[in-house]
Image (spheres, rainbow, N blue to C red):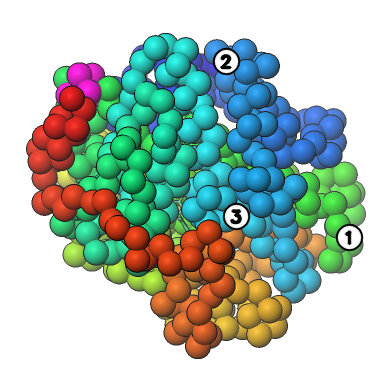
Amino acid sequence: MLYISTRGHPDRKHFCEILLEGLAPDGGLYLPERYPQVDAATLAKWRTLPYADLAFEILSLYIDDIPAADLHAICRKTYTREVFGTQEIVPLKPLEEGVFLEALSNGPTLAFKDMAMQLLGNLFEYELARRGEELNILGATSGDTGSAAEYAMRGKQGVRVFMTSPHGRMSPFQQAQMFSLQDANIHNIAIEGVFDDCQDIVKAVSNDLAFKRKYRIGTVNSINWARLLAQVVYYFAGYFQATGRPHPSPPPEGEGAKQKVSFTVPSGNFGNVCAGHVARMMGLPIAKLVVATNENDVLDEFFRTGIYRVRASQDTHETSSPSMDISKASNFERFVFDLLGRDGAKLRYLFAEELVAKGRFDLSHAVLVARDRYGFASGRSTHADRLATIRDTYRRFGTMIDTHTADGLKVAREQLQPGIPMVVLETALPIKFAATIVEALGREPERPAKFAGIEDLPKRVTVLPADAERVKQFIAAHCA
Ligand SMILES: *Cc1c(COP(=O)(O)O)cnc(C)c1O
């Protein structure tokens, strides 16, 4: 399998080449040349596999430059009960009839990003050792990416992490998770700005090709294809679990053989739901892919109107589901590439010219296709919705959900269809966003024992202005 840029660059690359890269040389995102197709017989065969073996089967369709035995060993080392807490790795929890939560947040940092990042850590270590090389990972986080990356890379040979985050904007628990790490290869940089300033810095540094080459800069942001690929696996695992149970009501005539499932995904940078799109393109019978946003509703606006309009920093709301506080969705370009028939020249025009000049583009002619052919739907959730959903879910089911998952569940309930199970992706545990849980329920969320008292540990962090040059200086000084 070879990978191409969404902006039409002529290069074709293998998986391990793009594994250690961020953006393509033309500023586009990497996608496979085609989506491997999975038929009903293969689905039937995969249904009973343990998660690690399912991951291996899916990954091996996209990776032809790691020997199968090695890739299988990496998958088995990554997806263990010890790291993710259960044998199923991503167990479904039933709520009301036909609605399930898929638990993706039982890894080391209690957010779904561990699902991909733990694999990435093992892939990086493997590939760097094979090449005898080092890598400096530069990332931007509003909280969950950074801690997931740091816990995946801490102590790994040949890897340093430089993680930027918006100064003072993460929850105390998230700050403690990251800043308490004392590993010599982990560097926390708090930027005086918002998350998008951090993302812009990462892009600016990555676009300085001389610096990037000299300091072996790589990325683990959600634009990394390997992360997206790792996330494809849990759509299959969720599908198998949701269809292994008795249907809430009989499926429509003749549909028994390919029972469909819908997914609702709390979305920010469109990475998680883009993995769902890839799963659907491979042939997984997904009815709807529901994009749930918070007050930062760039994506909901797009799927309602076809207008993609990025927001200015000052128009980006600081919400109680902060990991979805984005002004633009960095993976969205991947879906637009498919939506517009994989026309690299058109993508280059839209993202490198129109969006830069006007801050928006209009695909209203294609929005029905996005909904009907690609199954997308969307909705928006506010602080009040979040509180109400957390409260209601706790009262009715005794299940405490986090603020992002609450946005998902609220929007999912607006999109239910008879006979089609709805799986809501649980993207974090409530302890990460305790203040809002207290506001909703009047009590503290449960805290896993290994995180007792982490807010009081010594912190390791450097505060810098929102200036790519200053970040470059910091990296250079710490790579000696
Ligand atoms: C990262 C994150 C999201 C958004 O995921 P995207 O892939 O950026 O769309 C949602 N919820 C939580 C808790 C997250 O950490």
Residue at 22% over, 48% down: 189
Q: Mark yes or no: residue 167 visible.
A: yes
Q: Residues under labels 2 and 3: Cα distance?
A: 28 Å
- Identify the main secondary structure in magenta: helix
Judge left or right: residue 255 versus residue 157: right
Q: Position of residue 320 (x, y in %)?
A: 39, 72
Residue 282, above or below 26 = below
The tag on residue 66 is 2
Count of numbered marks:
3
What is the three-letter code of the residue carrying label 1? Pro
For marks 2 and 3 on the same chain, the one whose residue lies earlier in the sequence: 2
Task: Give the labeled residue for mark 1.
Answer: 246
Residue at 71% over, 51% down: 86
For ligand 1, tell me if the residue under mark 1 lies within 8 Å. Answer: no
Q: Residues under labels 1 and 3: Cα distance?
A: 26 Å
Classify residue 300 by image quadrant.
bottom left
Give the residues drawn in magenta, as a range. Answer: 211-215
Asked whether the beta carbons under mark 1 and mark 2 sit within 8 Å of each other, the answer is no
Residue 477, above or below 264 = above
What is the three-letter code of the residue carrying label 2? Ile
Q: Secondary structure at mark 1?
A: loop
The tag on residue 106 is 3
Residue at 27% over, 22% down: 216
What is the three-letter code of the residue carrying label 3? Asn
For marks 1 and 2 on the same chain, the one whose residue lies earlier in the sequence: 2
Q: Secondary structure at mark 3?
A: loop
Q: Nearer the viewer, mark 1 or mark 2?
A: 2
Q: Residues under labels 1 and 2: Cα distance?
A: 39 Å
Residue 43, above or below 25 = below
Q: Is residue 78 magenta?
A: no
Classify residue 73 by image quadrant.
top right
